[in-house]
Image (tube, helix red, strand yellow):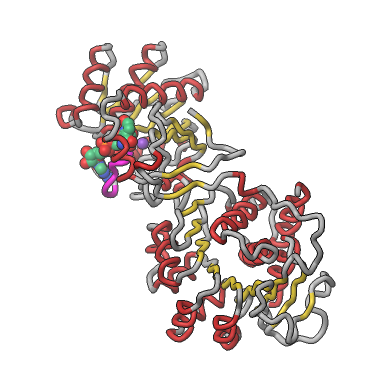
Amino acid sequence: MRALHPPLERMPLYGAASSRAIERQNTHLPLMERAGLAVAKLALALWPGSGPIWVACGPGNNGGDGLVAARWLAAHGLPVHVSLSADAGALPPDAAAAHARALAAGLPIHAEPPDTTPALIVDALLGLGLSRPPAGAVAASLHGVAKFAAQGARVLAVDLPSGLMADTGTALGEHTVRADHTLSLLTLKPGLFTGAGRAHAGQVWFDDLDVSPPGAHHPADAELLGDDALRPMPRDATAHKGSQGSVRVVGGAAGMEGAARLAARAALAAGAGRVYLDALSNAPGPADPAWPELMRAGAEPAVAQPGVVTLAGCGGGAAIATHLPGLLAQAARLVLDADALNAVAGSAALTSALQARTQPTVLTPHPLEAARLLGCTVPEIQADRLRAAQNLAERYGCSVVLKGSGSVIASPGHRLGVCPRGSAALASAGTGDVLAGWLAGLWAPEPEADLHALCGRAVSQHGAAGEALPLRASTLIERLSATLGAA
Ligand SMILES: NC(=O)C1=CN([C@@H]2O[C@H](COP(=O)(O)OP(=O)(O)OC[C@H]3O[C@@H](n4cnc5c(N)ncnc54)[C@H](O)[C@@H]3O)[C@@H](O)[C@H]2O)[C@@H](O)CC1
Ligand SMILES: [K+]
């Protein structure tokens, strides 16, 4: 069993169907006994040493895991209240066996939650089998979990916080468990790391139940990015500004110059040799009075040069649309953000031009921009962020960074990446411009880089730098710059 906290390793993620397939291959192993024992060990380690433990069991095998855990906890002499929100006669076979063993061990099994607030709740109500918003006895127990948690009980979720969808991180129903800890069993589920998952899972733990990694038999559905993505790329001692590539930022319409400047600053901080600002506001004066290193773009640098990354859209307003036909046709390397994405979404001609591009391109939408690009609603994007990112990558033939809690990275032909770094501190104006600029700046010196991996690196570094408050986009650039000190 291991806790998933920094430094994080890269880990494969398996959704419900893959997890069940892996389970089917290992039915000869006592998986539920192992799962329950792992839960009991973690509960023992987390138990504050006072007050009873409520093990809340549901109608499926998640409940079975809970029944095994309860048996072990009671065997350790801990004060355990076990409830079963189901008809014992309708339990699936493994859970029924766990139920029988618990009864044989002399454990009372109640129909109701305890009367008084427990110190620790083991949430074994629903796991992979969640199929609809909770109702009936399960919903009543979920309500009890929420009530006791509000009164200070700690919550350890078995496999998944009950009510959370394993594949998507969608919370079904109003009382989806908000756990302090979640122990993911056999496989690590993507829903713990994106959408509502990060808010509900708390500290994630993983136990593979001594099942060897499925490897090639079951390719993972996605990959959790590791902290190896945080390592800065070493800079060649012979590097000079010419070898570091250039970034041309096209954006900053009147009133939104700051967005383009933030992106340009971030690109420079990330390591681009030269950064030019093609401000759409046409205001006279330096590109950025506070950063004299930034230059105004003129005829140069030509976006078709392979050494140039063009970043279009930050603070672009409606004005960006007129620049996009040329950029889409010519830019050797292109990052589209913000208003450039909105312009593409609103124009069939720009959509065709983007789809016709053969040069490498990255899209960095937030959920609203993604919804516009896919012609759907934000809730539809958030209901399955992995699929949305994959659909965008396939529809436009680009690498995609779908921003938000648990950013998702998708590229045609690559395994989806989910970034566990970042926090709500990033929910502040300008941080998206910094990400786009940082990505462009990392890319500038590396024209041959694997773009999917480079997007993962940019998102991970940006996320890790954005985990502490207070945070302004400007301070984020300073923090990101500091991370390069290790290069
Ligand atoms: N597949 C695996 O990887 C393993 C599974 N194990 C455990 O088994 C769990 C999966 O077991 P199950 O497939 O039985 O699924 P669950 O235990 O999640 O529950 C399925 C049951 O809940 C009911 N249900 C679904 N949604 C409901 C709702 N909204 N309100 C009320 N009832 C609802 C279903 O009708 C069904 O009876 C895993 O999450 C894990 O805890 C472990 O024991 C070992 C390995
Ligand atoms: K659960």
Task: Give coordinates of residue 383: x percent, y percent.
Answer: 38, 58
Q: Is residue 171 above or below residue 147?
A: below
Task: Give coordinates of residue 347: x percent, y percent.
Answer: 46, 84
- Is residue 386 shown left or right of residue 336? left
Instruction: Give the residue at x 60% y 86%.
Output: 323
- Asked whether residue 130 is drawn in magenta, I would say yes
- Is residue 150 shown left or right of residue 321? left
Task: Give coordinates of residue 91: x percent, y percent.
Answer: 19, 30
Depth check: 111 or 294 in front?
294
Say how many tags the image has: 0
Q: Is residue 144 above or below residue 379?
A: above
Instruction: Give the residue at x 27% y 12%.
Output: 105
Displayed-image quarter of ligand 1: top left
Principal secondary structure, stretch drawn in magenta: loop
Instruction: Give the residue at x 51% y 30%.
Output: 2
Depth check: 302 or 84 in front?
302
Q: Is residue 169 above or below residue 283?
A: above
Depth check: 263 or 215 in front?
215
- Is residue 57 shown left or right of residue 430? left
Residue lying at the far left in this picture: please name it: 89
Residue 24, visible in the rendered structure: yes
Q: Quadrant of residue 334?
A: bottom right
Q: Quadrant of residue 315?
A: bottom right
- Asked whether residue 236 is drawn in magenta, I would say no
The part of the chain drawn in magenta is 125-133
Residue 140, visible in the rendered structure: no
